[in-house]
Image: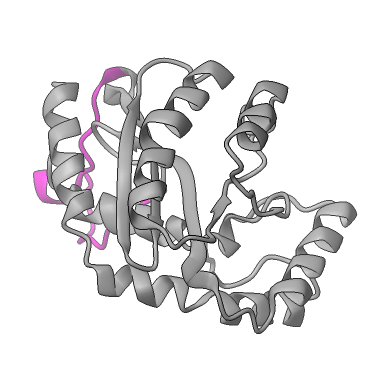
Amino acid sequence: MGRSPRKVPLLSRRNIKKRLQFGRQHLGRKNWNNVLWSDETKINLFGSDGKTFVRRPANKEFHQKYTKKTVKYGGGSLMIWGCFSASGVGPIFWIKGKMTAVDYLEILQNKMLTFAEDEMPLRWEFMQDNDPKHSARSVKSWFLENQVPVMEWPPQSPDLNPIEHLWGVLKNKIGAFKSKNKNEVWSEIQNAWYSISPDLCANLVGSMNRRCQEVIKMKGASTRY
């Protein structure tokens, strides 16, 4: 049977080596609850980025029930930043326009650090991916000045970041909500995000040793996560 291939990041030999090193280094780690996980994601106002399928009778391809509705130019999208820990979700932030290192510094200072100082354990660690804005010189300086330890993250590794699952949960929660008004969508996103249970967050963080085992098993290649 013909099937759509799973989409996974393109991995170089260096990427694979880094992923394997991460898995071996962190396998059996006991203090995953000390990590504050973060990421950005895009949420479409209408439709999705993925391919969908439908079962329909012959000659019914234009029947209302079996069509996928679209809008011109895709309907727009919202880019958001968020974080979470084993205790539950943290703040989220609506990134308006193209995010720069300056914008990211504002998020770190006004959203992330404020939350971490109130909610995270005394010895906590921040996780971010290798987006160029995250590794800008000004951002690195900010981490040093504020004494924020940053986890060394392997490149091209969304499967190792449990927040990716939370993005999926969030998008499922707001899947039926469609509006041309971005402010309404943002309000719905916030309501859905803060309704995510702490138990789910704890379970996701609890999966980290299994993720490390999986990446070792796959010899650094992409995992089922």
Give the colouring mode of the picture.
one colour
Q: Give the position of the C terminus as an image quadrant.
A: bottom right
Q: Is residue 110 left or right of residue 26?
A: left
Q: In the image shown, does 2 or 147 lie closer to the viewer?
A: 147
Q: Quadrant of residue 41?
A: top left
The x, y position of residue 132, in whole percent, is 67, 29
Q: Is residue 14 left or right of residue 67?
A: right
The x, y position of residue 47, in whole percent, is 27, 38
Q: Quadrant of residue 44?
A: top left
Q: Is residue 21 magenta?
A: no
What number of labels is visible?
0
The x, y position of residue 4, in whole percent, is 52, 60
Residue sitting at x 76%, y 63%: 19
Q: Main secondary structure of the magenta part?
A: loop
- Placement of 68 over or under 201, stated as above or below: above
Q: Quadrant of residue 77?
A: top left
- Placement of 54 over or under 116, stated as above or below: below
- Placement of 202 over or under 152, stated as above or below: below
Residue sitting at x 60%, y 75%: 211
Q: In the image shown, does 127 or 204 lie closer to the viewer?
A: 127
The x, y position of residue 17, in whole percent, is 86, 62
Q: Is residue 71 magenta?
A: yes
Q: Is residue 177 left or right of residue 36?
A: left
- Any part of residue 176 in sight: yes
Residue sitting at x 80%, y 75%: 219
Residue sitting at x 13%, y 21%: 181
- Any part of residue 60 in sight: no
| Chain part drawn in magenta | 52-72
- Placement of 201 over or under 29, stated as above or below: above
